[in-house]
Amino acid sequence: MDALTIDTLKAEHPDLVKAIASEGETTGIAKERARVSALRKWVDADPQNAKLGAIVREAETKGQTEAEVMPQILVAMRGAAEETPPAVGTLHAENGGAVKPEDEDKLVADAIATAKTIKA
């Protein structure tokens, strides 16, 4: 049996390839909307906070999640404009720095703990 390749699938099953691509696009769009919405809720909570707005805009541009920028968000929300939070690494550098969904709660908890030490 010959190895199944994308070219073979495209040639023999174009409708299947189109359906898979469409489903992937729909899923990707939904995930991106959720990511951006999670970030923008912070700006909605404090629209006058320029530092917070800048953090959210940068995160949107860089593709960062709410969990990844939580230390900076917390500092900005607490009015510590002169404070710069320490760099926070991601949990899974081996997968391109992406945070696995099951690890987001830990990352958020760590961010809160970091923000508390900055405030103190």
Image (spheres, helix red, strand yellow):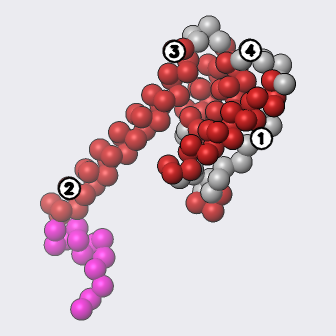
Asked if residue 36 lies left or right of residue 12, the reply is right
Q: Picture coordinates of residue 3 (x, y %)?
A: 30, 85
The CA span between labels 2 and 4 is 48 Å
C-alpha separation, residue under disc 2 versus residue under disc 1: 42 Å
Cα–Cα span, label 4 and label 3: 16 Å
Mark 2 residue type: Ala
Q: Residues within 10 Å of mark 4 (few under 14, many from 20)?
A: few
Which label sits in the foreground, 2 or 3? 3
Where does residue 118 sit, x and y in percent of width and height? 81, 28
Q: Quadrant of the C terminus?
A: top right
Residue where numbered disc 4 is placed:
79
Which amino acid, by three-letter code, is at mark 1?
Ala
Using the numbered discs, state the Cα–Cα distance from disc 4 to disc 1 in whole angstroms. 19 Å
Label 1 environment density (alpha carbons within 10 Å; few <14, some 14–19, many ≥20): few
Q: Amino acid at mark 4?
A: Gly
Kind of element beneath mark 1: loop
Q: Is residue 29 above or below residue 41?
A: below
Q: Most extreme residue toward the top, as rendered?
A: 48
Residue carrying label 3: 44
Q: Residue 19: give its label.
A: 2
Closer to us: 110 or 5: 110
Label 2 crowd (10 A; few <14 / some 14-19 / many >=20): few
Earlier residue among tags 2 and 1: 2
Q: Secondary structure at mark 2?
A: helix
Looking at the picture, tell me which residue is in the foreground, 27 or 83: 83
Name the element at disc 4: loop
Magenta-tinted stretch: 1-13
Q: Disc 2 to disc 3, how far (Cα)? A: 37 Å
At 68% across and 33% down in the image, what residue appears? 112
Q: Nearer the viewer, residue 104 or 37?
A: 104
